[in-house]
Image (spheres, rainbow, N blue to C red):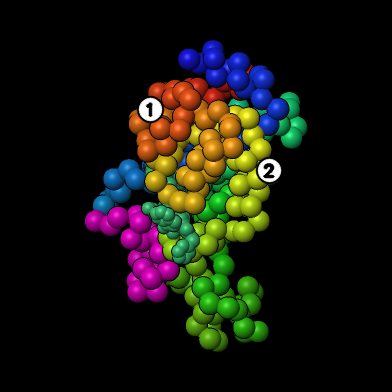
């Protein structure tokens, strides 16, 4: 199985890679659907990662993201992240990396042109349209920080459920899904759209879809092969 996929990697003019939280599991980042720990055990991530939740409970949602930022700050990209970055150095333009992850580990591994469909946990932006008084220099610290004049809140620069994905990144991802000969779908439960739909698009446009995931997913039906392996073990071998 692995040897077959390695052959497909060698043959493919254009490879698209779609990654999810499982890509970062071996870096120590709990996957999005892993049971939340400690203070957050009582909440479902999907209920926290929404604008409604943030407006209703700004401190709770802000502190959840601050907790995740702190957790990720001390972690490193794993061998899977490194293998993807090394491949694009050896084969410029042959691989498009699309991620649902907000942990920035692909970018830290050197994949500079990663298409980050769900934004970046390390950055903030204004919750409401900023006015002249909303200046970075005068932000009042807090949970969440806010504009001291109008009270506009800062929020994590991630895409919450019910929010549109960044148009340019999504368009580039859809183009790659339509034009690739091979799509590697790595470490995602395939439940969040429109990201998961990219695997369906690749399949419909004639690409071979290969899933790298120790567990079954709803996308297995469009996969030509499923490699039941962890990403950090499998990718370095596939992309060598
Ligand atoms: C939108 C940022 C338009 C925040 C995230 C169509 C059908 C049904 C529903 C919808 C639809 N279209 C839109 C929706 C609604 C919704 C949605 O998809 N809901 C789902 C739950 C049904 N989608 C949206 O709202 C999207 N917006 O469509 O806008 C619109 C606008 C207005 C009105 C209508 C429509 C926005 C979605 C983005 C949400 N933001 N993240 C944050 O992080 O806090 S999504 C979040 O889930 C993370 O980004 C995460 O990456 C993502 C998906 O989860 P996974 O990455 O797959 O992670 P998960 O834990 O689920 O799975 C891990 C996998 O790894 C497992 O399979 C496991 O087996 C595997 N694994 C574990 N270890 C390893 C491993 N694999 C390999 N190696 C290992 N070692």
Question: Relative to 134, is 67 above or below?
Answer: above
Instruction: Give whichever of 157, 142 is nearer the camera.
Output: 157
Q: Quadrant of residue 34?
A: top left
**Is ligand 1 within 8 Å of the beta carbon of the residue shown at mark 1?**
yes
Q: Secondary structure at mark 2?
A: loop
In this rendering, the label closer to the viewer, 2 or 1: 1
Residue 150 seen by the camera? yes
Q: Earlier in the sequence, mark 2 or mark 1?
A: 2
Question: Relative to 156, is 136 above or below?
Answer: below
Magenta segment: 42-64
Residue 7 is inside the magenta segment = no
Question: Which residue carries the number 2 mark?
Answer: 112
Residue 56 is inside the magenta segment = yes
Is 22 left or right of 95, judged from the image as shown?
left
Q: Secondary structure at mark 1?
A: loop
Question: Which residue carries the number 1 mark?
Answer: 214
The residue lying at 35 percent from left, 30 percent from top is 215
Q: Position of residue 156 (x, y in %)?
A: 50, 62
Q: Position of residue 134 (x, y in %)?
A: 60, 80
Is 41 left or right of 205, judged from the image as shown?
left
């Amino acid at each position: 199985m692995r040897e077959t996929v390695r052959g497909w990697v060698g043959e493919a003019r254009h490879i698209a890679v779609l990654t999810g939280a499982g890509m970062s599991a071996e870096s120590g980042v709990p996957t999005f659907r892993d049971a939340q720990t400690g203070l957050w055990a009582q909440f479902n991530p999907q209920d926290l990662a929404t604008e409604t939740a943030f407006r209703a409970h700004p401190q709770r949602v802000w502190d959840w993201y601050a907790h995740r930022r702190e957790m990720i700050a001390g972690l490193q990209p794993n061998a899977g992240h490194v293998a993807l970055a090394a491949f694009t150095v050896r084969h410029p333009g042959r691989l498009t990396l699309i991620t649902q992850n907000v942990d920035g580990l692909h970018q830290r591994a050197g994949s500079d042109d990663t298409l980050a469909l769900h934004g970046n946990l390390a950055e903030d932006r204004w919750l409401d349209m900023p006015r002249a008084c909303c200046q970075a220099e005068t932000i009042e610290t807090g949970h969440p920080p806010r504009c001291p004049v109008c009270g506009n809140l800062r929020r994590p620069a991630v895409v919450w459920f019910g929010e549109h994905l960044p148009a340019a990144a999504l368009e580039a991802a859809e183009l790659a899904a339509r034009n690739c000969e091979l799509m590697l779908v790595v470490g995602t439960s395939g439940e969040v759209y429109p990201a998961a739909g990219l695997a369906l698009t690749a399949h419909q446009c004639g690409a071979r879809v290969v899933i790298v995931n120790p567990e079954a997913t709803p996308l297995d039906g469009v996969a030509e092969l499923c490699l039941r392996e962890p990403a950090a073990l499998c990718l370095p071998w596939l992309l060598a």
